Image (cartoon, helix red, strand yellow):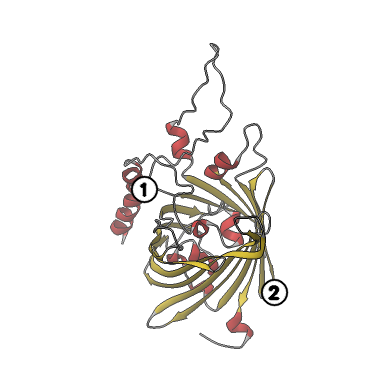
Amino acid sequence: MIRPVRRFLGALLVLPALLLGSEAYAQIGGQRAFASLGLPPTAYLAGVGGVSVSGRNNDPGMLYGNPALLNSDMDGRLALSHGDYLADIRQSTAAYVRNTERLGRWGFGLSYLSYGDFEMYDPAGTPLGQFSVNDYHLSLTNAHTFGNFTMGATARLAVAGIAGNHSVAVLTDVGSVFKHPEQDFTVGLAVKNLGYQLKPFEGSSREPMPFDVQLGASIKPEHMPVRFTITAHHLYQLDIVYLDTLQQRRQSLDGQQETPKKSLGDKIARHFVVGGELILGKSLNVRVGYNHLRRRELRLDNVSGGAGFSFGALLKLGAYQFEYTRAIYHVSGGTNYLTLSRNVHELFGKKE
């Protein structure tokens, strides 16, 4: 068993270098449809920086992080999450996991994102009432465990609507997780949002999906009440730096404007998200996360305002588990996430 594990871990270490070695020359923002699939739908994912493919816990919503994260601690649990973004943008998510003897472990997820209501006008400026904009994501996940490894896949239907005009896409996530047999250490790899836009919006052409390749690890040292998580995202493309052409530029000593440059260090750093959990007991822990890409892209010229950082906590009260996260996106504000979960099989007296 030792040799396969070593080979697996070695492949995970080599994979980022191979993927990052093929450089592309375009940023990722605004280039693909259904960008809402990249938003963290649960308090845990938001609390550790927005992405995690190795955070193995009892939250059914982790099927959105990596389908291979489904595990026995999730069996029979239902999680309801809500996030309020800037303005009137709201996201609600439900996730549930059930285990079967023959067909593996199944996860079901439904996420709804509302962008609010907007005023509609004709070309002459006459008001025509309001229209709504929203996204729906329906997910079905299946995972199987083989020794220390878990393999999983998610089939997803995504629908976006703008004033009665709809776009439809089908996507899939595939992932794997290695869990150390003795230590609290996991490694995860996920290929996410691989799909096709079946129906574009009327009058527009098909667009690519928000494809991503993520690799991460989580570890809790044996004698420390802390769990660390690090995740690398968009491994298929080295250069994801966006340089705003309207950004204020500095002038050199001779009065010439200096063109912003992309350093190799900045290119690499934008791929990483780090998070940590301080475990204060069986019923309480606190979280912090940092997303470097978010901080660099959403900060202002002269102030960052905490952009890229997130803070959260988990509290267990009896059979119920409450999770809260405050994720800061911009100096003007951030997002509050709340997740409530419990084992509904125990609630209704149902046994696995």
Q: Is residue 57 above or below residue 291?
A: below
Badge 2 marks a residue whose secondary structure is: loop
Residue 51, percent from left and from top? 51, 54
Residue at far top of view: 254
Residue nearest the observer in this picture, 37 or 255: 255
Residue nearest the observer in this picture, 2 or 31: 31
Residue nearest the observer in this picture, 328 or 177: 328
Q: Amino acid at mark 2?
A: Gly
Residue 236: assigned label: 1
Residue nearest the observer in this picture, 248 or 4: 248
Residue beneath the point at 50% across and 60% down: 37
Residue beneath the point at 45% across and 30% down: 263
Q: Is residue 131 above or below residue 46?
A: below
Residue at far front of view: 124
Q: Amino acid at mark 1?
A: Tyr
From mark 2 to mark 1, how far is it between C-alphas?
44 Å
Task: Say left or right for 148 vs 254.
Answer: left
Residue 184 visible somewhere in the drawing: no
Badge 1 marks a residue whose secondary structure is: loop
Disc 2 packing (10 Å; few <14; some 14–19; many ≥20): few
Task: Say left or right for 14 vs 85.
Answer: left
Residue beneath the point at 54% across and 57% down: 39
Task: Say left or right for 265 vs 49.
Answer: left
Residue beneath label 2, please?
Answer: 318
Q: Earlier in the sequence, mark 2 or mark 1?
A: 1
